[in-house]
């Protein structure tokens, strides 16, 4: 499967997705679902050390947060460091401790 913007999903982010968001998903399914959801996020918020926190939605309507850091030197894919349930969205924002309003992606609505 090809994505317009591919992401490297760390093993921790895969395990977090399997545990917190979609129990029973295989590692390959977790990577595919995270990458697909990040192609069309609902909202984003700046984070610490250049990270961006995204609010994403799966095809079944379930929402989750993903913390993405810029691509390290020499690599072209940004890195998904962790994921969590949508109810953690405010926790992601508080954890990042970066002032500013979240940016809602045009055409999407954040609940």
Image (cartoon, rainbow, N blue to C red):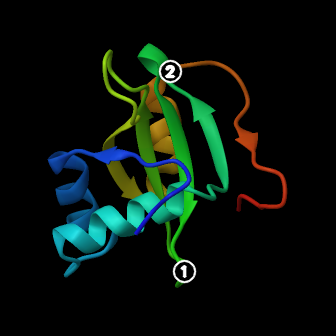
Q: Position of residue 36 (x, y in %)?
A: 48, 64
Q: Left or right: 43 with respect to 93?
A: right
Which of these two is toward me, 45 or 87?
45
Q: Which residue is mark 2?
A: 97
> Which residue is nearer to you in this view: 71 or 10?
71
Image x and y of residue 49, in percent: 42, 14
- The local secondary structure at tag 1 comes to loop
x and y, in percent, of residue 104 in the image: 76, 46
The residue pinned by badge 1 equals 59
User: Which quarter of the rendering shows the N terminus?
Assistant: bottom left
* Pointer 1 or 2: first along the chain: 1
Residue 13, numbered circle: none
Q: Which quadrant of the structure image shows residue 71?
A: top left
Q: Decide: marks 1, 2 in contact (CB < 8 A)?
A: no
Residue at 32% from the left image edge and 15% from the top image edge: 73
Q: Is residue 93 left or right of residue 71?
A: right
SS state under label 2:
loop
Residue 94 picture location, percent across and down: 49, 31
> Badge 2: few (under 14), some or many (20 or more) residues near its Cα, within 10 Å?
few
């Amino acid at each position: 499967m090809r994505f317009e913007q591919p992401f490297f999903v760390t093993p921790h982010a895969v395990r977090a997705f399997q545990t917190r968001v979609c129990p029973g998903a295989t590692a390959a399914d977790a990577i595919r679902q995270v990458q697909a959801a990040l192609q069309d996020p609902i909202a984003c918020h700046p984070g610490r050390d250049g990270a961006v926190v995204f609010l994403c939605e799966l095809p079944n309507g379930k929402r989750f947060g993903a913390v993405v850091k810029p691509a390290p030197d020499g690599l072209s894919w940004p890195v998904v460091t962790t994921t969590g349930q949508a109810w953690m969205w405010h926790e992601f924002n508080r954890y990042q401790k970066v002032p500013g309003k979240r940016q809602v992606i045009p055409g999407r609505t954040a609940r």
